[in-house]
């Protein structure tokens, strides 16, 4: 299925409480060498036809205007996939 | 005078807000997130809760609702708008107020009676307070940590846009102890704590005078009532 994948991460300098809690649990499980865990989002936009350049442009716009909030997050990538 | 209260799927405090409006002497009007018009209300409250289950980000989906679009349009014309808790998050996601709200610094949901300082009493919702008056109203949130860029913070401080600051305790790690903001015009105000839960003796926060006697929240709604009547 043609889809556009949007990846979003919390900003580097912000506390990621979810990641911190998971890192603590992994340390307890013995994975001591993991220095940090950060958790972001992968959002898939599905299509039932070929994805055009225009779709990708629109997805990029939506990624920064709606799917992420630039005060707290960065859009890492917006890519086409089959 | 009619004050609309928008209910989104997942809103919790809409009826409390309606009750506060009634106690202040105005008529509450229930509005639904899918409403394309706001029934000619004189002011709007975006109440607390978990609109759309806090999906994507708190307030992000509500910011795109038809009723919110109309709020954004009319706020530009001076309609008084108060966003409480999730309503504040919706105002921020709608870009009616700058910055963002993130998970509390201590990672806990915090529920307490919170002391605030009214820093700006020139807004539609704070005109009956004294400048620097300290008030006590309930606070209950998990994602109330206010953040903004240094540039935005400088602007907010310089333009007297910080309506409320936390006093004694900063419950959620908010930058500059920010509890609430106003827009430049003073018609849009958003804050994390809940004025609508401190409007009736017997049901508010404890005060030094008597248990549950705190009604500091009532003045928010009386302020806007006075403003609209005088306008």
Image (spheres, coloured by chain):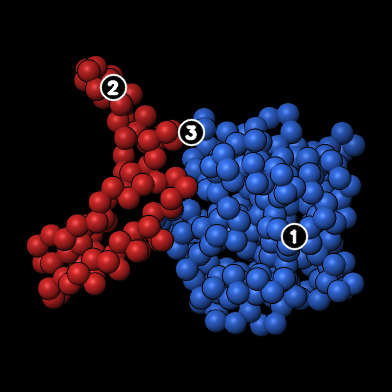
Chain colours: A red, B blue
Q: Quadrant of the C terminus of chain B?
A: bottom right
For the residue pair B173 and B39, the one nearer the viewer reads as B173
Q: What residue would you read off at disc 3?
A: B107
For the residue pair A76 and B51, the one nearer the viewer reads as A76
Q: Do the residues labelled 3 and 1 touch (CB within 8 Å)?
A: no
CA distance for labels 3 and 2: 20 Å
Count residues near mark 1 (Cα–Cα under 10 Å), then give few for <14, some for 14-19, many for 20+.
many
**Direction from residue B134 to residue B171 in the image, left or right:** left
Q: In which quarter of the image is the N terminus of chain B?
A: bottom right
Quadrant hosting residue A3: bottom left
Where's residue B76, x and y in %? 65, 71
Q: Which residue is drawn at 53% across and 46% down?
A: B101
The lab-note entry on whether marks 1 and 2 share a chain reads no
Disc number lying in front (1 or 2): 1
Where's residue B100, x and y in %? 53, 48
Disc number lying in front (3 or 1): 1
**Direction from residue B63 to residue B183 in the image, left or right:** right
Q: Residue at x 55, y 60 (%)?
A: B95
Quadrant hosting residue B183: bottom right
Q: Which residue is drawn at 50% across and 64% down?
A: B63
Q: Residue at x 70, y 54 (%)?
A: B182
Q: What element carries label 3?
A: loop
Q: Earlier in the sequence, mark 3 or mark 1?
A: 3
The lab-note entry on whether marks 3 and 2 share a chain reads no
Q: What residue would you read off at disc 2?
A: A35
Disc number lying in front (3 or 2): 2
Task: Say which chain tag 3 marks.
Answer: B
Q: What residue would you read off at disc 1?
A: B186
Count residues near mark 2 (Cα–Cα under 10 Å), then give few for <14, some for 14-19, many for 20+.
few
Count residues near mark 3 (Cα–Cα under 10 Å), then give few for <14, some for 14-19, many for 20+.
some
């Amino acid at each position: 299925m043609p889809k556009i994948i949007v990846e979003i991460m919390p900003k580097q300098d912000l506390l990621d409480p979810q990641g911190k809690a998971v890192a603590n649990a992994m340390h307890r499980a013995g994975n001591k060498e993991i220095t940090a865990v950060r958790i972001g989002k992968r959002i898939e936009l599905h299509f039932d036809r070929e994805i055009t350049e225009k779709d990708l442009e629109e997805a990029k716009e939506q990624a920064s205007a709606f799917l992420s909030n630039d005060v707290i997050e960065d859009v890492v990538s917006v890519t086409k996939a089959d | 005078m009619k004050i609309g209260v928008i209910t989104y799927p997942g809103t919790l405090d809409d009826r409390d807000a309606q009750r506060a409006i009634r106690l202040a002497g105005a008529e509450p009007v229930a509005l639904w997130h899918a409403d394309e018009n706001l029934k000619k209300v004189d002011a709007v409250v975006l109440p607390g809760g978990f609109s759309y289950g806090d999906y994507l980000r708190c307030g992000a989906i509500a910011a795109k609702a038809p009723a919110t679009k109309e709020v954004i349009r009319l706020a530009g014309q001076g309609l008084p708008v108060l966003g409480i808790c999730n309503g504040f998050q919706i105002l921020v996601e709608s870009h009616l107020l700058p910055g963002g709200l993130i998970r509390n610094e201590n990672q806990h949901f915090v529920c307490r009676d919170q002391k605030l300082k009214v820093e700006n009493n020139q807004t539609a919702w704070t005109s009956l307070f004294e400048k620097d008056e300290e008030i006590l109203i309930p606070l209950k949130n998990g994602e109330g940590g206010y953040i903004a860029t240094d540039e935005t913070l400088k602007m907010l401080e310089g333009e007297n846009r910080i309506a409320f600051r936390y006093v004694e305790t900063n419950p959620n790690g908010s930058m500059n102890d920010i509890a609430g903001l106003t827009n430049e015009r003073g018609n849009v105000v958003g804050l994390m704590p809940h004025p609508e839960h401190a409007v009736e003796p017997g049901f508010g926060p404890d005060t030094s005078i008597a248990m549950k006697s705190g009604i500091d929240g009532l003045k928010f709604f009386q302020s806007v009532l006075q403003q609209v009547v005088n306008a």
